[in-house]
Amino acid sequence: MDIADKNNCDEHFKDFLAKKLGIDRSTIPNPGIWFGTGETYSALSLKLDLLTTEKIDTVLDKTQDQNMHFAETAIKLGFIKKEQSEKILQLQLFHKKQTLLEMMLLNNQIKLEDIWVILSEYEPPNRVITSL
């Protein structure tokens, strides 16, 4: 998945929110520069106990040497299975949606219980996620 695909998923979710909540799409917050902080592939891999800090360093070194994505390198080195990688990438997208909903909660656009309903009803576009 490239940047255009990620943006497409974000736009798809915003379209869903506008329709679901009956609001103007322009009222949905635009995330700031720190939006994805703490939800990088390596951070999630560490948090989920799939990679150690040492393995992350190895992956980063190899990624720079071979001009590959972090996920591709981690799989190539045998640190993470392809199926695990796909789930990590899906979790990244999930966390982005959750954070956007948290912003809407703080703006009094939705209630806390709405977050669970929205996330359970949303169906992302059908895509095979290979890398971020």
Image (cartoon, rainbow, N blue to C red):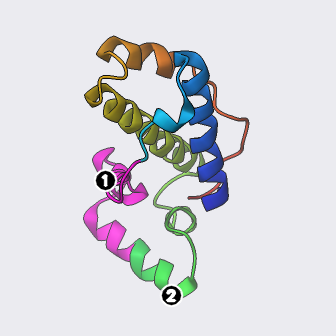
Q: Residue at x 35, y 67 (%)?
A: 56
Q: Is residue 18 above or below residue 63?
A: above
Q: Is residue 132 above or below residue 93?
A: below
Where is residue 40? Give x, y as percent: 39, 56
> Start and end of the magenta stretch?
31-58
Query: Judging from the image, what secondary structure is the residue with disc 2 in?
Result: helix
Q: Amino acid at mark 1?
A: Leu
Give 128 or 57, whichever is nearer the viewer: 128
For residue 47: magenta? yes
The residue pinned by badge 1 equals 46
Is residue 50 shown to the viewer in this render? no
Q: Is residue 104 above or below residue 5?
A: above
Disc number placed over residue 65 in the picture, else none: 2
Where is residue 124? Give x, y as percent: 64, 32
Q: Is residue 65 above or below residue 21?
A: below
Q: Amino acid at mark 2?
A: Asp
What quarter of the picture does the N terminus occupy? bottom right
- Decide which of tag 1 and tag 2 comes sooner along the chain: 1
Q: Residue at x 43, y 46 (%)?
A: 30
Left or right of 115 in this view: 21: right
Q: Residue at x 62, y 32 (%)?
A: 15
